[in-house]
Image: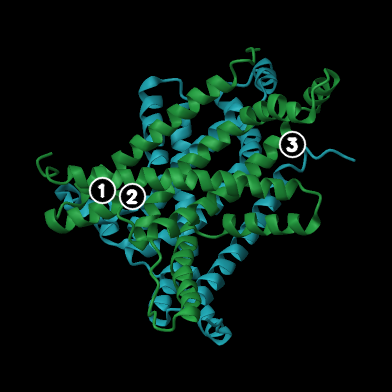
Chain colours: A cyan, B green
Amino acid sequence: MSFDLSLIVETVPKMLAGVGLTFQLLGLSAFLGLILAIVLLLMRISGKWYLDWPAQLYIYVFRGTPILVQIFIIYYGFPQLEFIRESVLWPIFRDPFGCAVVALSLNTGAYVSEILRGGVLGVDRGVLEAGEALGLSTTQRFIYLTTPIATRLALPAYGNDIISLLKSTALASTITLMDMTGIARTIVAQTYAPYEIFISLAIIYMILTFFLQKFIGLIEAYLGRYTKRES
Amino acid sequence: MELLSGWWDDFFWGSVVVAQVFLASLVLMVIFGLIGAAAKLSGNRIVQKIANGYTVVFRGTPEILVILLLYFGSAITLTWISRLFNPDIKFVDVPPFWAGTVAIALIVGSYATETFRGAFLGVRPGSIEAAKALGMSGLQVFFYIRIPEMWRLALPPFGNHMLSLIKDTALISIIGLNETLFVAKQAIGTTGKPFTMYIVVGLIYLGFSTVITLTVMALERYGNHTVRAR
């Protein structure tokens, strides 16, 4: 058994060629997922059962099933349904990239909406009462008081979810996409050197995770700049 | 529904495999988590460093990568080792069941490490002092005070770890474990109905998640039965 260093030097640039696709999947799904999460959050806190219940059901289903199954239902399953093949959305579902983005967004949206709800529920009642006493309307209180405080409270958990999302993008390789993991799997199939390839790729992912964490830490520090205690 | 006739028993046995992987990985996950937490809480710097390395690596790497690495890597390593004793051996096959089970247990165990560590540190010092003042021995304090309080603190995140485990079992189909997703692939080959088959898999997993969630809720109620509502 040997550990072939030259193979690593040779293959790491090949795998890095897929980092763009990984980032596209991450960025698009994070953005679309966040929009979905905000819609779900508003439905859940609307106080109207006909909005709250569908949102709860959605979250329950998407958090209760594996992301891989969701990806397979969308990529392999949807073409079975005629109304999807005939709809205007068909170009998206025909394309593995579109399917991966849709599946990742739908999945992360369910998780993030719960994170945001945690933030909203964490806002101190006293602040809202003070806003009411100052004559702010419900909408104004939500925009000027709840939103900034809830964002600050939810950010650490949101950061963890973004990192989970980065890891989930690796599953796009199961539906023929050539992201970093897809490329690595192809190389391993050719060279049969799983240690060299997969460990190098794991290190690349860990570096990305590290920078994502740093980046989120910077946003946290920025949003928390007024709440910092002097010591 | 008639489409599924003939496949029910396959899906049933696939679900049994999911349950087996879940239970085996649950035991391993608790063991890895406890070892990791003990290492992080130990005074030894080197042991702490190793435990930190463990959690950083397994929380920063995609699950599928860990599974693939363990499966193909262990096959290569075991082949190499067995060739030392018997050069005639061509290749050693590693069962996907165990490669996958150990992989997901290692991944979720890295999260459980933090949960157990946090729960240990979350036990109020006052409770321990009170117990000591009442004349309890070290072991009594551990079993009557520390464990029940840790249990209460760790249970909600622990429930999430169990949900992660059950969902991660789906990934093991990638290395050929004959669980429900794998069954669905075979069924699609014959029936040509991917949507129907994968929806069945989704419902099976939803069922598992529901059972786990309800169990954790019941355990939480039991764990808190001595805590009066404020």
Q: Which mark is residue B121?
A: 3
What is the spatial separation of the Cα atoms under label 1 and label 3, in whole angstroms?
Answer: 43 Å
Depth check, mark 1 against mark 3: the one in front is 3
Q: Secondary structure at mark 3?
A: helix
- Quadrant of the image containing the C terminus of chain B: top right
How crowded pointer 1 is (Cα within 10 Å; few <14, some 14-19, many 20+) is rated as many
Q: Quadrant of residue A59?
A: top left
Q: Residue at the spot x=54%, y=47% of the render?
A: B29
Q: Evaluate whether label 2 is on the same chain as label 3.
A: no
Camera sees residue B6: yes
- Determine the chain carrying the residue at label 2: A
Q: Residue at the spot x=58%, y=16% of the render?
A: B225
Q: Which mark is residue B198?
A: 1
Question: Which residue is identified by label 2?
Answer: A69
Left or right placement of residue B199 versus residue A137 in this view:
left
Q: Is residue A8 above or below residue B180?
A: below
